[in-house]
Amino acid sequence: MVNTFKVSIQTNSILASRKKPYQNRFQNFKNLMGIEMLETAIESIETIIVDLPTIRPHKLAMHTLQHQTLVIIRVRCADGIEGIGESTTIGGLAYGNESPESIKTNLDRHFAPLLLGQDSRNVNAAMLRLERCIRGNTFAKSGVETALLDAQGKRLGLPVSELLGGRVRDSLPVAWTLASGDTDRDIAEAEKMLDLRRHRIFKLKIGAGEVNRDLAHAIAIKKALGERASVRVDVNQAWDEAVALRACRVLGSNGIDLIEQPISRNNRAGMARLNAISPAPIMADESIESVEDAFNLAREGAASVFALKIAKNGGPRAVLRTAAIAEAAGIALYGGTMLEGGLGTLASAHAFVTLDRLAWDTELFGPLLLTEDILNAPLVYRDFELHVPKAPGLGVSLDEERLAFLRRDKTATHVQSA
Ligand SMILES: [Mg+2]
C-alpha cells in the first residue's frame, strides 16, 4: 500500500522575520494545495513484501528456511530523493516478535502517519518521534532508519557509513553458516567455500537434534577443516543449562571457537554461569533484543561476545549504541545477520565498518543464501570479505523490474532480464 500524501500543517511563525539566515535551515515550498511544506518532507512510505527462495533448506533450531521473506521500505521525499530500507526476520514469528506481515501492517498503519510530512533529513528527530509513540518493533524501526539514512546519504553524496561517523575499513570478513543438517554435506560445502576464497569462518546451526549427535557433528566438521577455518556453533537457545554445562566443555575442548546463545534468553544468570566455565567464549544473540538488554548482560557478565544486529536494536545508528556498551565493558563484537537481502545486509555493513574492533568478524552472508536478487548489482564478496560500496547512501539500487515480478502482490507477470 502506498500511503497517500498527508499534509502536515506548517504555520508560518511570527518570529520568522527575526530569524538569522543560519536559523532558516529548512527551505520550504508550496504543494499543489498551496500549503507550505518542507522541501525535504517525507511524502510517501511504501512497504513491499518479497519472497525469495533459498539455495538449500537452511536448518535452524527453531525453523527451517526454504525461502526468505523481505520487507522492503521506500521513503519518498518531496525533493525527489528516495530512500530504501529493509526489515527482515527469520521464520515468520519463529525468531522474534515481529513477522513480515506484522511489520508491513505496522509500518503502513502506525509508522507512516507519524512520519509523513516530517523532515527526512533529520533522522534523529524522525526516529525519536517513532520511539515516543511506538514501543518495541525494532525490526520495522530498523528498516525505516535505514531508508532515512539512504535518502540523506544520496542527498549529500555520502555513503551511510560516513553519516554514521566515518568508516575505518572498507571490507568485512564474512562467516558462512553450514546448516544443511548433514555432516558430510556440510564438510563438502565448507571445502567449496575455502576453495572459492569466499569464507573461512563457519558457523554450525545445532540444537534441533539429539545433543550427542550435535556434538559429534560439530567435532567432525572441526576435525575435517582443522586450522584452515574457525568453526563456531549457534544453539539458538535450544539447550537447558544442565545440557549446556556439559556440551560447552566438550565443544570448547575440541576446537570449537565460539558458542552462540546456548540457552534461553531469559536465563541470564545461567548464561553468566556458562560464561564462567566454558572453555570457548559464550556469545549473546537472542539475549539482546534491545540496547538495554546489552547493558544488563554486560553488567552481569553473561557473555564474552555480543552479536550486533541492526534489526534487534532499531537500526544502523541504534546498533552502535550496543557496540559502545560492549566496548566499554570489554566485551568482544560480532556482526550478526537476520539473513537479510542486499539492502539489510549493507545497512548492517555500513554500521560495522565504522567499528575499529570487530574481533569475531561478521556473518553478513544473507544475499548469498538467496537464489534471486532484487538489486541492480549484486553485493561484492571477494577474498573472504564483503566489500562495502562507497557510492552515496547504501550504494545500491533496486531492480524495479525484478521487484515487480518477485513481490508477493505481483505487479508484473514476467521479467525481461535474466
Ligand atoms: Mg544466532
Image (spheres, rainbow, N blue to C red):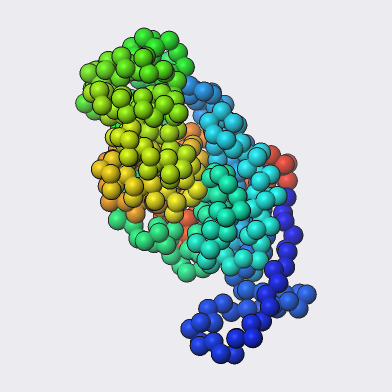
Q: Residue lying furthest right in this view? A: 33
Residue 375 drawn at (x, y percent) = 54, 48
Q: Is residue 348 above or below residue 52?
A: below
Q: Which of 389 and 23 is in front in this view?
A: 23
* Residue at figure coordinates x 69%, y 57% from the top left: 113
* Residue at figure coordinates x 39%, y 51% from the top left: 320
Q: In which quarter of the image is the C terminus?
A: top right
* Residue at figure coordinates x 57%, y 35% from the top left: 97
**Residue 98 visible in the current orientation:** yes
Q: In this view, does 20 lie above or below 331?
A: below
> In the shown orientation, is residue 54 left or right of residue 256?
right
> In the shown orientation, is residue 260 left or right of residue 52?
left
Q: Is residue 210 above or below residue 150?
A: above
Residue 183 drawn at (x, y percent) = 38, 15
Q: Nearer the viewer, residue 329 or 334?
A: 329
> In the shown orientation, is residue 28 left or right of residue 194?
right
Q: Which of 370 and 105 is in front in this view?
A: 105
**Residue 349 visible in the current orientation:** no
**Where on the image, by quarter, is ligand 1?**
top left
Q: Residue lying furthest bottom in this view? A: 17
* Residue at figure coordinates x 53%, y 58% from the top left: 128
Residue 313 drawn at (x, y percent) = 47, 45
Residue 275 drawn at (x, y percent) = 29, 27
Q: Picture quarter containing residue 241?
A: top left
